[in-house]
Amino acid sequence: MTTENGFFVHRVAVIGLGLIGCSWVKGLRAQGGVGEVVGFDRNLDSMELACETGIIDRYATSPGAAVADADLVIVSVPILSVRPVLQALSASLPQHAVITDVGSVKGSVAADVKAVFGAGFGRFILGHPIAGSERSGVAAADEHLYCRHKVIITTEAHTDNTALQLVMQAWQAVGADVEIMSVGHHDEVLAATSHLPHLLAYSLVDTLANNHENKEIFNYAAGGFRDFTRIAASSPEMWRDIFTANREQLLATLDLFNKDLLQLREAIVQNDTTTLMGVLTRAKAARDHFSNILARRAFVEPMKTSSLSYLVQPAKCLSGTFRVPGDKSISHRSIMLGSLANGVTEVSGFLEGEDSLATLQAFRDMGVVIEGPHRGRVTIHGVGLHGLKAPANALYVGNSGTSIRLLSGLLAGQSFDVEMSGDESLSKRPMGRVADPLRQMGAIVETEEGGRPPLKIKGNQALKGIHYVLPMASAQVKSCVLLAGLYAEGSTSVTEPAPTRDHTERMLKGFGYDVQVDGSTVTIQSGGELTATSIDVPADISSTAFYMVGASIAPGSDITLQHVGINPTRIGVINILRAMGGNIEVMNEREVGGEPVADIRVRSAQLKGIHIPEDQVPLAIDEFPAIFIAAACAEGETILTGAEELRVKESDRIQSMVDGLNSLGVAAQGTADGAIIPGFGPEGSFGAGVIASHGDHRIAMSFSMASLRADAAIVIHDCANVATSFPGYVELANSTGLQLQIQGDVGGD
Ligand code: S3P
């Protein structure tokens, strides 16, 4: 008999019959992975109980006797007992036997192995399961303890590969995920994530218990005290051993903590509430982020979010009056300019999507105190144009092209070096378009091959203003150059080949910065200041586009979209749908904080195919996936040209849409700079199909709307990134008429 993964050993010896070792062999037995288990423990009762409960077959009277004839030896004793145990068994260890341990510190065990077996001994595998229980001892042994838990195995240059494979298999056989690390890295990580928190918990309880005159504190210490100090009830002997064994790493992390704690103390002494809020908001954001991971199990990577799919059943029509989340472009810019302003900027309507949150986190990482977001409200304590601090690590901006491109401009003007990276999709997108003009301004920007991220930007470069003629219509590149211009000597101007969204220009003005606009050229001078303001972010017209298309194609639909940003550089989707015969009414036009806003009523209409005017392309650049769906439902052919930019978005949107339409039975064809889409007209419908969204939020949402004209279910894969721009999409879509179910794991951080 073997386990499912083919693991089997004839005899296992377990030295130390506690929860950890017993649970492992119990699991191995349950899986049929072991012939006989021999145990040893210095406590006779434990050995007898282990026999009675069938965890071991027999016990030995010494470690040496236990390991004779063993194929696998598991040493699961407290860290400082490892060396004496190894000394006691070394003479009896069979030549072929593989030996492993389960200790929380690996450097000290590696030293013990070297001292007892000699420097090149490769058959000892240093392991550390990240699992445990409030309970301990043989009685608590649980064969499922390691199921879906991490086990870290640390290797050294002389580690024997066959022995390593055997121990890995033995862990995998009981359901564990094995991760390999170096000894030093393991001890550093564990010092910070486990050993320091335990030290602090013990220390706090001791301080309060001993030094506090008023013992009454314990009577009222139900909440924070209890939560914070739960781990101080762990085994003192075990933790004495761990603190002693991981001395160097623990001291290093303790010193860092002491330094930060003193700074916090000083902030309290000085009544410095901004610094206090900085620490608290950064810590909360970090804790919120990690709690998802922690909720699963210790040290486990978030589930690959690509496993999230949509199953959309045919639906009839859309109806209702509602507001979609805040504008993504404006949300990004509110954080950027608010951070660089003097004073406190209040933002409402902020998009709590992953992209704009990535920008928010980047500024927190650069020392800006940002409160929220809480129901779309964000308070930014601006640090001034020269107040950013070097982040401790590379800035990670996930899926967000706007973050990386706009940030590269303003980071080029800072006094520190910085690196920016992103997810798989962003790592394929072109950054040469921002690196080129920045280099002309004197910045030092390194990219990966082909101008891809990560980007490395060198600080302390004297930038000079340039006049840049954009080679493509891109608001991100325009904004990048203008933001670098805030730090460049003299004036910086950008001329665009076609109008692109002008939120940067509008918002700079809103922050009191002088911006000259002359036809297609925008100019700014350095030397000014940004003054904090308040920003009301309107609903994102790009997010309304799915609903505008859905309501247009589904007979009987009638929706009103509230408080939508209708900046003239963004209304291509309205113009195009109207040109196709769409019934779209723009009502209640008003201006909010420098941006035009309106309510938009959309009713179903008989659409007809058109050749989309090229001047509308930059004005609807993010809306084409949705427009392709409208085109497929229209009478006659729709032709798109001049839209090659679509090929370098979150996915190649021409290809993604054409492939998806083809799989639903629409013979759309891609061209170099657009597509030709035959419409099936009022009598036609989409067939059943499976769509690859390529992790592109807009592809996923667009195809969900196709269900309003489908005669069978549509499955859309890889939809997790909808959260980058449209949190709550599924709930809203269902409440307005779609029949959308989420399938797969909703994991992710
Ligand atoms: C954006 C500009 C556009 C757009 C993107 C947001 C911005 O990108 O596609 O979603 O906020 O400036 P390009 O500048 O690459 O066209």
Image: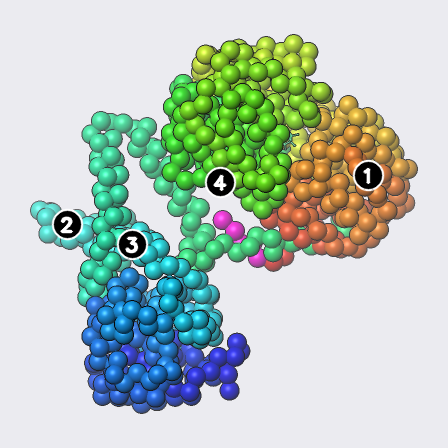
Alpha-carbon span between mark 2 and mark 1: 72 Å
Question: What is the number of the mark on residue 685?
Answer: none
Q: Is residue 446 above or below residue 669?
A: above
Contact? badges 2 and 1 (CB < 8 Å): no
Q: Which of marks 2 and 3 is in front?
A: 3
The three-letter amino acid code for the residue at tag 4 is Tyr
Residue at disc 2, secondary structure: helix
- Residue at screen point 37% across, 64% down: 156
Give yes or no for residue 112 being in the magenta stretch: no
Q: Nearer the viewer, residue 409 or 702?
A: 409
Secondary structure mostly seen in magenta is loop
Alpha-carbon span between mark 3 and mark 4: 25 Å
Magenta residues (range): 745-749
Contact? badges 4 and 1 (CB < 8 Å): no
The three-letter amino acid code for the residue at tag 2 is Thr
- Does mark 2's beta carbon lie closer than 8 Å to ligand 1? no
Alpha-carbon span between mark 4 and mark 2: 39 Å
What residue sits right under mark 1 in the picture? 671
Q: Nearer the viewer, residue 119 or 369?
A: 119
Residue 11 image offset from top left, x and y in percent: 38, 86
Alpha-carbon span between mark 4 and mark 1: 34 Å
